């Protein structure tokens, strides 16, 4: 495994300490673009300013200089806007529930994907790796 002094490297992709990671940068930019929602934080600047520093227990963590506080604020404001206007919007939630109903009904009626029930697709690497939204194209309504 990775030495403890290098565990901060995991924070770059998925930061459980403060929620600031490149995964969010990527999907915020993508989703905001497709929803025509402005992105007011500068992810490139945050990446350039990021440093690994020891916390009060001596464990290295990804940190940002105080001068980037407004940029970090704008990151979380973008997150709030996306949640409010898209991810948790009542219409998005209603459509998500309808799609779940379709999948449940398909399974109850005997639909299989690559020889497996949808609820068992995760047990087969072949089925799981190829299961995408296109499954809705082959479910016979």
Image (spheres, rainbow, N blue to C red):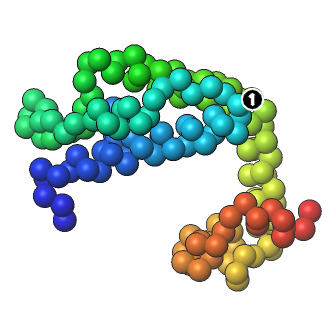
Image location (x, y in percent) of residue 97: 75, 44
Image location (x, y in percent) of residue 52: 19, 39
Image location (x, y in percent) of residue 103: 76, 59
Q: Residue at x 73, y 44 (%)?
A: 96
- Looking at the image, can residue 60 be seen? yes
Rendered image quadrant of residue 109: bottom right
Q: Secondary structure at mark 1?
A: helix
Q: Which of 31 and 104 lies nearest the eye of the viewer?
A: 31
Q: Quadrant of the C terminus?
A: bottom right
Q: Tell me if 104 is positioned left or right of 55 in this view.
A: right
Q: Give neighbour class at mark 1: few <14, some 14-19, many 20+ (Cα, 10 Å).
A: few
Rendered image quadrant of residue 115: bottom right
Image location (x, y in percent) of residue 74: 47, 21
Q: Residue at x 75, y 76 (%)?
A: 112
Above or below, comparing residue 56 to residue 30 in the picture: above
Q: Residue at x 48, y 26 (%)?
A: 41
Q: Which residue is mark 1?
A: 90
């Amino acid at each position: 495994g990775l030495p403890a002094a290098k565990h901060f490297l995991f924070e770059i992709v998925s930061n459980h300490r403060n929620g600031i990671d490149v995964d969010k940068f990527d999907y915020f930019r993508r989703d905001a673009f497709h929803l025509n929602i402005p992105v007011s934080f500068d992810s490139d600047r945050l990446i350039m300013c990021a440093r690994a520093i020891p916390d009060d227990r001596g464990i290295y963590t990804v940190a940002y200089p105080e001068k980037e506080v407004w940029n970090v604020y704008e990151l979380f404001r973008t997150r709030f806007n996306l949640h409010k206007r898209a991810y948790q919007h009542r219409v998005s939630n209603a459509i998500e529930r309808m799609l779940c109903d379709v999948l449940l009904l398909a399974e109850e009626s005997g639909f299989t994907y690559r020889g497996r029930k949808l609820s068992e697709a995760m047990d087969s690497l072949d089925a799981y790796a190829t299961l995408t939204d296109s499954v809705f194209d082959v479910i016979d309504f």
